Image (cartoon, coloured by chain):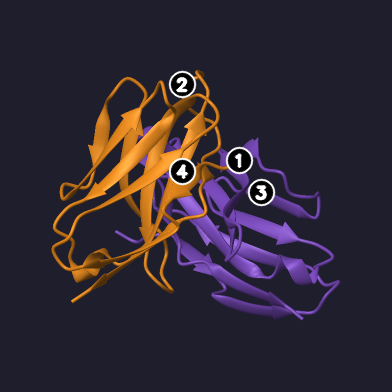
Chain colours: A purple, B orange
């Protein structure tokens, strides 16, 4: 079966612009979580959506937002990009919750802000 | 709060064993383990639940000490394919789930011939 699909794979944006990233979870998975991965900080939790509702939220500024559609696909948006937003953004899907099912991660979107 | 992993990095020869530790300052409901190879997505290895239930990978084992809020991942008779960065993720509290999973900063493991 198809895995978690993230698009685009790579993005280069200019400081101040906004960006939208997309994630299609595994068929049947209703939970989608987003993580930011940087070399120094590891995987930082952004937010989790379940059945179109935000169920959990990390400690990121309001410039980071997300949503989930009725087909479980999710998007995250970052407005007014800063150089520090350069990172690999990973989407993780799960059937219901990460426990006890575990996450299946997508390959990520590599965002570079210049 | 982020769990603390140790060691930060380790180099093994094929066939050697390794232990990776994960420690949290808060009560835990579950501990997850993932492996990420360079340029690839993290891959689920194992999950350990409060109360002792365990699921996951058949060739790698783990323990979960609820009282100490610690987990350890055991890699025995390492193979070249074990190389990668290992992350533990913790879900806290007594609520029974549906909380966010917080990851440690990873342990970089390299297996050499």
Chain at numbered mark 4: B
Residue A52 badge: 1
Nearer the observer, disc 2 or disc 1?
Answer: 2
Q: Which sits in the foreground, B49 or A77?
A: B49
B64 in relation to A33, above or below: above
- Disc marking residue A34: none
Q: Are marks 2 and 1 on the same chain?
A: no
User: Within 10 angstroms of label 4, few (less than 14), some, or many (20 or more) residues?
Assistant: many
Q: Mark 3 points at which residue?
A: A67
> Would you name the residue on which mark 2 appears?
B96
In the image, residue B32 lies at what x, y percent? 39, 41
Q: Are marks 1 and 3 in contact (CB under 8 Å)?
A: yes
| Left-right relation of B39 to A38 | left
Q: Name the residue under label 4.
A: B89
In the image, what residue occupies the spot 58% across and 78% down? A10
Question: Where residue B84 appears, x then y in whole percent?
Answer: 35, 66
Q: Mark 2 lies on which chain?
A: B
Identify the element where label 4 is drawn.
strand
Quote the CA–CA distance across marks 2 and 4. 16 Å
Label 3 and label 4: CA atoms lie apart by: 24 Å
């Amino acid at each position: 079966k198809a895995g978690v699909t993230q698009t685009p794979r790579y993005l280069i944006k200019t400081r101040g612009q906004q960006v939208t990233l997309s994630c299609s979870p595994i068929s049947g998975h209703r939970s989608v979580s987003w993580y930011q991965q940087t070399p120094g900080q590891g995987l930082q939790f952004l937010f989790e959506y379940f059945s179109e509702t935000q169920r959990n939220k990390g400690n990121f500024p309001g410039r980071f937002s997300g949503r989930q559609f009725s087909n479980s696909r999710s998007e995250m948006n970052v407005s007014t990009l800063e150089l520090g937003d350069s990172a690999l953004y990973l989407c993780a899907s799960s059937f219901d919750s990460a426990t006890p099912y575990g996450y299946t991660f997508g390959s990520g979107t590599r965002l570079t802000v210049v | 709060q982020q769990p603390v992993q140790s060691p930060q990095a380790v180099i093994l020869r094929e066939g050697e064993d390794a232990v990776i530790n994960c420690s949290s300052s808060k009560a835990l409901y579950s501990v997850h383990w993932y492996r990420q190879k360079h340029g690839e997505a993290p891959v689920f290895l194992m999950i350990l639940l409060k109360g002792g239930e365990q699921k996951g990978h058949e060739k790698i084992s783990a323990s979960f000490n609820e009282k100490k809020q610690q987990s350890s991942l055991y890699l025995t008779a390492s193979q070249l394919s074990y190389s990668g960065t290992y992350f533990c993720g913790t879900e806290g509290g007594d609520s029974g789930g549906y909380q966010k999973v917080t990851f440690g900063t990873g342990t970089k493991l390299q297996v050499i011939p």
